[in-house]
Amino acid sequence: MRFIDLVATHAAATPAAAAQRTSDGEEITYGELWERSGAIARHLASEVPASCARTAPVIVYGHKSPLMITGFLACMRAGRPYVPIDCHSVPADRAAGIAAQLPRPTVLATEDFPAAAAATSGTVLSREVLRTLIEAGGSVSANRAIAGEDTCYILFTSGSTGAPKGVEVTAACLDNFLAWDLTLGGIDKTGLVYLDQAPFSFDLSVFEIAGALASGGTLASLTHGTQQSMAGQLAALAASDIDVWVSTPSYADLMLSAPEFSSSLLTGVKLFLFCGETLANTTARRLHERFPGARILNTYGPTESTVAVTEIEITPEMAAAPAPLPVGRPRPGTRLRIVDGDGTALAAGAPGEIVIEGDTVARGYFGRSDLTAHSFSRVTWEDGTTVRAYRTGDEGYLDDEGLLHYHGRLDLQVKLNGFRIELGEIEEQLRRLPGIDAAALTAPMRDGRVNHLVAHIVFNGERLAGESDFRLGLRLKEELKASLPHYMIPKKIVFLDALPMTGNGKVDRRALAETRG
Ligand code: AMP
């Protein structure tokens, strides 16, 4: 069944049930969600004829408020793709860059929309205008809703050439993902409370939104303000009644650093769902100790194949063993292939690039046919089904039992605290700053994960009077914050006379990694 139809069913059957509760005390019921999204959808539908709706994306800007998810549903119901932009993770210049890649997008501004981004957008509907539309009421015909190959959302992720790239996920991708998602953990998912912690700009949040709203459950949203203090988070979690925990392993590690984080605080949690980065044995082990009644699932997948495509339950025995944890078996509808540099399929046990084929692979990168052609293709299976395939850039192998094991990346993409980062994007933004002639990033690891980012730069520009390397580094970091999210700002800046080069004229990243930092 379609996601949007499932939400409609819950709105009709249990209109007073809570669809979302935030740690700031905001709440919206299914009835309100349906009514309000219908009113906004009516306006969005009036802007473009149905035949053009699927190519007229709408930016939904803001944070964790109920108006954000109302905006997402409104777009789906009006047949228009939505582009979620989290106001705390995406600085103004980056929002402007995203808007500039879209055809004069309408903006549902649930928070103040930066002027720089408004300049590259179409109509900006402020909170007040959205409230007026809601008061006016109305709805749209169910025929307008997205379906099948219509684009559901476009999620912008870090891009190696300096600008973020928009992954175009279809309605069918979401529905196919959902059919599997609702089976995960082997528990009845009806009406459960889901942790909603990941910013809506990241596809991990789709795990939360789709899972909760498709099953008549509730999103327990931790806002940016709440996430600024451990005490605030623990208090919000204690009050949340969470059944399903969804996060990156990094976020679980952060919470595990508080001794109170246990089944005495979260009494109802049944399932931990992890995705997005390596789940360490120690993390799983500590969770088993603190939450003996809960199951732990490791899942794997990039935004380009809709949240996750493999899963495996991590038992206490697996967590205690010395072997790194596998990332799981493919869902029905997904096939995995491991290929060498020429694209030739490799046998079980041999490491190579992971290729994902199936019915949740995205359409490609919005407006970037060059990037799409590089990573996406079509394949026909022996039963005649034609599906999309995506070359992940991830390295791994399939064992004899068909379990996928993840090794790392084949390129310069890293995960820092669960955030996906192309080092090339930071390097490009550094090179755009006055005085920087060359820049290369390294990402030192600790305990198997990236610990921080180091920028190695050649600076031949003007220094302020008496400005030390340290002060100049702080100034450059400040300047970077205009275009890059906080998690992409290098922790250290190392000044060099020249970048070391390998024999074939490339930056010698190994030599850089050995320099201080
Ligand atoms: P994102 O598009 O932000 O979800 O990031 C996708 C990337 O995160 C993948 O291509 C992998 O490199 C990494 N990733 C996702 N799931 C896992 C996992 N379970 N273990 C290790 N790395 C993962």
Image (tube, helix red, strand yellow):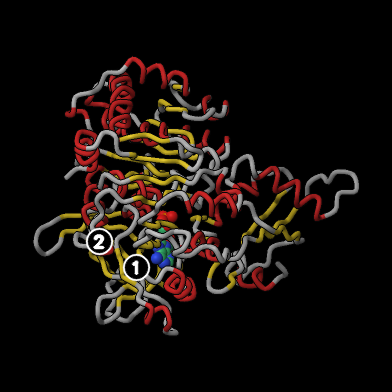
Secondary structure, mark 1, is strand
Q: Decide: is 104 above or below 414.
A: above
Q: Is residue 396 above or below residue 65?
A: below
The tag on residue 317 is none
The amino acid at mark 2 is Ile
Q: Earlier in the sequence, mark 1 or mark 2?
A: 2
**Regarding ligand 1, which quadrant of the image does it lie in?**
bottom left
Task: Report whether 307 appears left or right of 505.
Answer: left
Q: Nearest the camera: 422 or 435?
A: 422
Question: Residue 482's x, y, as percent?
Answer: 63, 39
Q: How many marks?
A: 2
Q: Residue at x 9, y 58 (%)?
A: 384
Residue lying at the far left in this picture: please name it. 383
Q: Residues within 10 Å of mark 1 (few under 14, many from 20)?
A: many
Name the quadrant containing residue 281. bottom left
The numbered mark at residue 187 is 2
In the image, is 32 to the left or to the right of 502? Answer: left
Q: Which label number is shown at residue 295?
A: 1
